[in-house]
Image (cartoon, grey):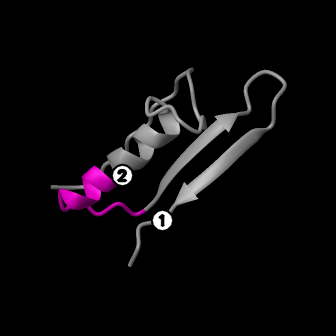
Amino acid sequence: MGNWAITIIGTGAHHNKDYEGDANKIFEKVVVELKEAGQNVEHASFTYGGRDTERPNFESHYPEK
């Protein structure tokens, strides 16, 4: 047992109303699954944009206490 971090960088669909394959929706499910498995998720975030000429967008999901 020890500290861990997960970093994934990719390109694909995100923030679509009715598409379950969106990266942000999968991200949220993974965070929930880690917490349900007893992992201590200190911080989780999903960013998008920020490559080329776009400014980055940042979403932060802190675990509920």
Residue span colored magenta:
32-42
Residue at the extreme bottom: 65
Q: Position of residue 46 (x, y in %)?
A: 55, 44
Local secondary structure at mark 1? loop
Specify the amino acid type for callout 1: Tyr
Q: Is residue 3 visible?
A: no
Q: Using the rendered view, name the quadrant where residue 14 is placed.
A: top right
Callout 1 environment at 10 Å: few (<14), some (14 to 19), or many (20+)? few
Query: In front: 52, or 17?
Result: 17
Q: Which residue is drawn at 41% across and 73% down?
A: 64
Tell me, for residue 4, which label it has, or none. Answer: none
Q: Is residue 34 visible?
A: yes
Side of 36 where 13 appears, left or right: right
**Could you tell me residue 21's position as x and y percent?**
44, 29
Q: Position of residue 52 (x, y in %)?
A: 78, 21
Q: Is residue 60 magenta?
A: no
33 or 38: nearer the eye? 33
Question: How many angstroms separate mark 2 from mark 1 (CA)?
Answer: 10 Å
Across the whole image, how many numbered discs are drawn on residues? Answer: 2
In the image, is residue 49 above or below residue 6?
Answer: above
Residue drawn at (52%, 23%) of the image? 10
Q: As drawn, is 17 to the left or to the right of 54?
A: left
Label 2 vs 1, first from the N-terminus: 2
Q: Which amino acid does label 2 sit on?
A: Val
Give the residue at mark 1: 62
Q: In this view, does 24 lie above or below 35?
A: above
Residue 2 in which image quadrant:
bottom left
Image quadrant containing the N terminus: bottom left
Residue located beneath label 2 in the image? 31
Q: In this view, does 51 lie to the left or right of 23?
A: right
Q: Position of residue 33 (x, y in %)?
A: 26, 51
> Element under label 2?
helix
